[in-house]
Amino acid sequence: STQSTGDLWDTSLQSEIEELYDTVEEEAGQFTTVEGTGLFHLQSKLNHSCSPNCQIKYERSNFTLTVRAVRPIATGEELCISYFGECQMNRHSRQKHLLANYLFVCGCTRCVEQAGQPDISSSEGEEED
């Protein structure tokens, strides 16, 4: 049987996407709050902030992603989302989570302002390494 060029391209693309997800999982671990997966060009350009000026919403009915402002945004201000939704964790716990799951140390305004907080976990107030 012969495959059309479109079928080969679809198979190749699917293979590349699966390889990409395998690499992400290998490097960053599994995401425990994922309800589904998708690749969104706009969202990929949004960085994290512990005090985000935007939030994302997935429209399941039409498989679209919407980015909405959650506060006034100044001209030229970077659009940022929180990588873990509404965050009530203290600075140390946020930093630990971001480093373990996203491989970076956050330097957003909120983290800089809270830099003097003790390095204790949000849960139980136990000290962490």
Image (tube, rainbow, N blue to C red):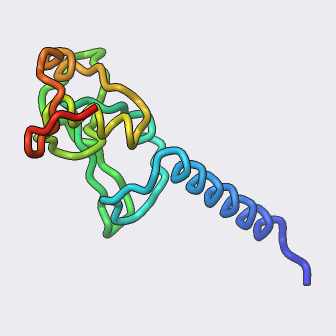
Q: Which residue occupies 30% across, 61% down?
A: 59
Please tell me whether residue 102 is drawn above or below residue 119 in the rendered image: below
Question: Residue 36's x, y, as percent?
Answer: 39, 65
Image quadrant in which the C terminus is located: top left
Q: Is residue 54 left or right of residue 14?
A: left
Q: Quadrant of residue 44?
A: top left
Q: Is residue 18 left or right of residue 8?
A: left
- Is 116 in front, or is 35? 116
Q: Which residue occupies 71% across, 65% down?
A: 10
- Is 109 in front, or is 103? 103
Q: Is residue 71 left or right of residue 96?
A: left
Residue reaching furthest right?
1
Q: Which residue occupies 49% across, 52% down?
A: 39
- Is 110 in front, or is 46? 110
Question: Residue 2's x, y, as percent?
Answer: 90, 79
Question: Residue 90's x, y, as percent?
Answer: 13, 33
Image quadrant in which the N terminus is located: bottom right
The number of numbered badges drawn on the structure is: 0
Question: Residue 34's x, y, as percent?
Answer: 35, 60
Q: Which residue occupies 26% across, 45% down?
A: 84
Please tell me whether residue 32 is drawn above or below residue 26 in the rendered image: below
Q: Quadrant of residue 104?
A: top left
Q: Quadrant of residue 120?
A: top left
